Amino acid sequence: MSGLPKQAVIFGGKHGLLGRALVSALCAAGVQTLAVAGTDVDYFDADALHDFLDAYENEDGADADLCLINAVAYTQVDMAEDQPEEAYKLNAAFPALLGVLAEERGHRLLHFSTDFVFDGAKGSPYLPTDATNPLSVYGASKLAGEEALLGLDLPGLLVLRTSWLFGPGKLNFVQRMLELAAERPELSVVNDQHGSPSYTPDLAALSLALLRNGATGLLHAANSGPATWFELAAAAIELAKRPCRVNAIPTSGYPTRAKRPPYSVLNLDETARLAGFAPRPWPEALAEYVAEYMAGHTAGQATQARNL
């Protein structure tokens, strides 16, 4: 199955950080797009999901060239340690339901997973074929979702592992660092966890390229280049010209409920080959995001001042 679908139903498309970027990219590409939230349909009721898709297809004349996209996830990594049932429900049970729906209805399915399926022991960028060994409930629940889908007979299935999302439309790590840098003289950020930052508009564009070229199976998707949380935060704060000192600390200096992989950088070689281009380096994407964020922040301050 190659070429962009004529229509797409994006679960998580109304409010999600990645979902919103996907909606924007698909609409710009001329794909008829339906953004879905959990308030629109019960994600865990197979009959309700069937009826929901029936209503959409009947109302909008949807045909077989429709892609289901799952950008929904339980992403509260630390909270998942205390709420494993909730994490598995959204990260494993829901993707499995969508997989069965896609198989029965003959639709393509694009699902997003995470770098947290790895334990970080490899020390070099992870290939999609590398052994998994999640260290947290979150990672294990996302891996269960992958396995449920890959165990089905879905010729149009594409599973993309991604990581460290930042972008417009919803609070994310970079935005939070910029907010804190405006309030505090210094920040301390972990510098011994290495990953692949992902700018959501770039991730959406990469996803569309893979769909267009008929990519299937399990792939990795992110911006190019490794980073630590410290490096990402320091670069963003420097770009924003915030007068805030950023201190590098070890993971032990910022204990969390869930254990994180110390190294989960994603190898993108096969993704670049199938997409037809290499994702741009994360510092370029970060510069674009920070410039847009600061422009919007400045405009918001000006509007607030006029209303005083």
Image (spheres, rainbow, N blue to C red):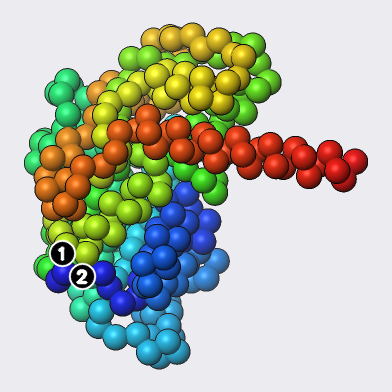
Residue under the image location 18 percent in, 53 percent down: 275
In the picture, measured across the screen, residue 275 lies left or right of residue 203, that is left
Q: Is residue 274 visible?
A: yes
Residue under the image location 58 percent in, 21 percent down: 241
Q: From the viewer's perspective, is residue 14 above or below residue 296?
A: below
Residue under the image location 75 percent in, 38 percent down: 301
- Percent position of residue 111, x then y: 28, 57
Quickly name the residue at label 1: 214
- Percent position of residue 308, x then y: 90, 41
Q: Is residue 54 visible?
A: no
Quickly name the residue at label 2: 3
- For this orientation, the residue located farthest to the right is 308
- Percent position of residue 265, x then y: 24, 29
Q: From the viewer's perspective, is residue 273 above or below residue 225?
A: below
Q: How many numbered discs, if any?
A: 2
| Dot 1 amino acid type | Gly
Residue under the image location 40 percent in, 49 percent down: 201
- Mark 1 neighbour density, 10 Å: few (under 14) some (14–19) many (20 or more): some
Cβ–Cβ under 8 Å for marks 1 and 2: yes
In depth, the one of 192 and 91 nearer the eye is: 192
Q: Quadrant of residue 165?
A: top left
Give residue 27's mark: none
- Percent position of residue 166, x then y: 44, 39
Q: Secondary structure at mark 2?
A: loop
Q: From the viewer's perspective, is residue 248 above or below residue 215?
A: above
Q: Quadrant of residue 118?
A: top left
| Dot 2 amino acid type | Gly
- Mark 2 neighbour density, 10 Å: few (under 14) some (14–19) many (20 or more): some
Q: Secondary structure at mark 1?
A: loop
- Give the CA separation, mark 1 to mark 2: 6 Å
